[in-house]
Image (cartoon, helix red, strand yellow):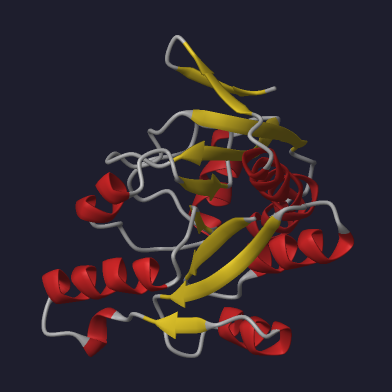
Amino acid sequence: MLRIAVLVSGGGTNLQAIIDAIKSGAVTDAEISGVISSKHGAYALTRCSENGIPSKVVALKDYADKAARDEALVMAVQSFSPDLVVLAGFLTILPKRLIKLYPNKIINIHPSLIPSFCGDGFYGLKVHERVLERGVKVTGATVHFVDEGTDTGPILMQKAVEVLPGDTPESLQLRVMQEAEWKILPAVINAIAHGKVKEKNGAYYID
C-alpha cells in the first residue's frame, strides 16, 4: 500500500481528485496517510475532516523564522511516514533537506505544459493570465518529480487543453483542472503505486 502525504495551501481541488480516485477505484493500492497545509483555514482541511484524513498546519506565521518553519515541515511530513509526497497546490518552496530525504518520491502538479509558463512566479491564475496574454492555442498540465529547482524536475505525464476564444483566466483555470489536472495527478499516483514509473537514460516514462 502506497502511503501518500499531500501538501496543500488552498481549496484542495487536486486533493479532492485524489480522494475521489481512491474511492472510485481509479487509484488502487494507495492511501492518503495525511495532509499538511501551509495555511490555517484552507478549505482543503475541511475536505480532510469530511473524509477522515489526518491533517496538520505548518504556517510560516507560527514560527520564529523560515528555518524553524522548514524544520517543522520536514517533521510533519515524516510523521505521516509517506512513500510518496504529493504537492497539490502547495505554494511554498520546499526545504532542500526534505527534497534530499525523498529523492524521486515527491511529485508536483503544474497548470501548464512545462517548460512553458513555469518557474518562479508562475502559479495559480498567474499561469493562465500569461497563457492568454501570449495568445497560445494549447495549454494543459504537467505532473513532474520535484528537484531543487522550480518546476525543473523530470516530467512524468502531461495533458493538453485547448484555449478557447473568450477564455478568461478563471474559465481557463477551471477547464485545465477538469480536463487535465484532476485526471493526470491520480493517474500518476496509480502508476507509482503499481511500480509502472520507469527510468531510461535519465528520462522517466510510465510503462
Q: Position of residue 180 (x, y in %)?
A: 73, 44
The residue at the point 46 percent across, 54 percent down is 123
Residue 44 lies in quadrant? bottom right
Seen at 79% across and 59% down, the residue is 21
Q: Return the residue found at the far right.
A: 24
Q: Quadrant of the C terminus?
A: top right
Front one among 77 and 166? 77
Rendering quarter of residue 136: top right
- Relative vertical location of residue 32 with respect to residue 48 in this rendering, above or below: above
Left or right position of 159 against 128 = right
Residue 43: x and y in percent read: 60, 83
The residue shown at (73%, 43%) is: 187
Q: In this rendered view, identify the residue nearer to me: 165 or 82.
A: 82
Which x, y percent locates residue 95? 24, 57
* Residue 72 drawn above or below residue 197: below
Q: Is residue 147 left or right of residue 67?
A: right
Q: Is residue 135 left or right of residue 164?
A: left
Q: Nearer the viewer, residue 30 or 51?
A: 30
The residue shown at (73%, 58%) is: 174
Q: Is residue 116 above or below residue 58?
A: above
Q: Is residue 110 placed above or below 46 in the rendered structure?
A: above
